[in-house]
Image (cartoon, helix red, strand yellow):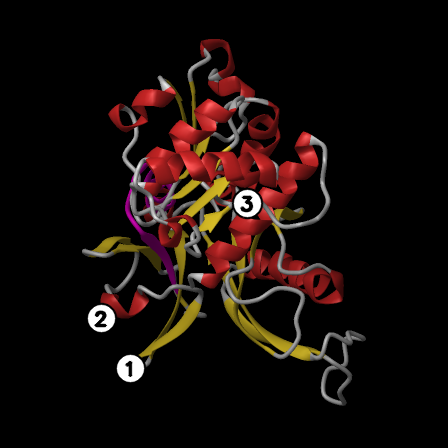
Amino acid sequence: MKQLLTIMQDALVRKQPLVLVTIVDSTGSTPRGAGSRMVVGEAGCLYGTIGGGISEHLAEEEAKTLIQEKRSLLKAYILHPNKEADLGAVCGGDVSVYFQYLNPEDPGIVAVIQGGIEYFTGREHIWMVNQLTEEGPACLGFAGEAGLLQWTGPVPQHWQGFLSPQGTLIHQGEATYFSEPLVRASFVYVFGAGHVAHELVPLLAHLGFRCIVFDDREPLVQPERFPGVEQTLLGDFAHIAERVQVTQEDYVVIVSRSHLCDFQAAAFALGTPARYIGIIGSRTKLNVIREKLKALGFTQDILSAARVHAPIGLAIKGETPAEIGVSIAAELILVRASSL
């Protein structure tokens, strides 16, 4: 989403009109669900996808027409054989798509989108909200747990309804809104900056996770080694608590260079409320680490809790750092989705 907003901002600053295309509701089997977005300019799609195929092609063409007409539109697409509007799709579901025209001459739109980009640096849950209006200027903004942060157009009265764990349509009187989480107040702390982290962090960043890498080797904690990383930290594995504070929203990934560093990181992580703790290694190595953790006073219940994943990652039989990175990323996606 940060990349989407950045592209929107750049285009609007250059006075290029846009249409933000969003799936706001879906039923049955569809390629993408509510919250899938793409931004379309006069020449076509600039970024994002709402699922590909014939429906995305038709939506892109519709968006280009709406740019010329300078208006917004809510439209349904039927993705199964039917007599009314057979698109040739056989997915079996339907989607409602909102086309929101963004006028580059509206200074409020540019300011709000800029504000949305800045929220990605904070540690607060943020929601993006669009009012589904087909006439007049675009109404959109952002909400936090304390209230509306920014808004263009008439201010909604009941912002608390926007704080949904996933993309949701909200009806308030005659007004209809679509709200979805924009920034999640969680980080992935990656302990170890070696080959696996090098593959994993850019992938997680692309998937919308915010990563912080920790290691005691200064040459390896350079931010340029980890495209998309939020922060890199240089420190001693024996004193992680002096540099890191983990909350119940956070994930811990332990992929360091040695048994000792893994053990020290695990001992730290188990003392935090992290929702996920993953430790790399063979079962033999992990058994050694478990025994050392028990000697520190960690009980079997703590070590076998659902949040502890050892060995880390989904079992896809990966061996290379890139494959291991994919297996870890897949497991984090599953944990994140299960918490919605």
Residue 217: x %, y % from top left? 46, 12
Nearer the observer: mark 1 or 2; the answer is: 2
Q: Is residue 119 visible?
A: yes
Nearer the observer: mark 1 or 3; the answer is: 3
**Residue positioned 20% across, 70% down in the render:** 157
The secondary structure type at the circle numbered 1 is loop
Question: What are the residue bounds of the magenta stretch?
Answer: 112-130
Q: CA distance from mark 2 to mark 3?
A: 31 Å
Residue 118: x %, y % from top left? 34, 37
Residue 34: x %, y % from top left? 52, 67
The secondary structure type at the circle numbered 2 is loop
Please, is residue 179 above or below residue 49 in the view? below
- Of all residues, the one furthest to the bottom in this rendering is 83
Nearer the observer: mark 2 or 3; the answer is: 3
Q: Which residue is mark 1?
A: 173
**Quarter of the rendering containing residue 196:** top right
Is residue 84 a member of the stretch shown in magenta?
Answer: no
Q: CA distance from mark 1 to mark 3?
A: 36 Å
Q: Earlier in the sequence, mark 2 or mark 3?
A: 2
Q: Horizontal placement of 180 versus 331: left or right?
A: left
Q: Amino acid at mark 1?
A: Gly
**Residue positioned 59% across, 57% down in the render:** 68
Q: Earlier in the sequence, mark 1 or mark 3?
A: 1
- Of all residues, the one furthest to the right in this rendering is 88
**Quarter of the rendering containing residue 91:** bottom right
For residue 207, the mark is 3
**Residue positioned 47% across, 17% down in the render:** 221
Q: Amino acid at mark 2?
A: His
Q: Which residue is mark 2?
A: 158
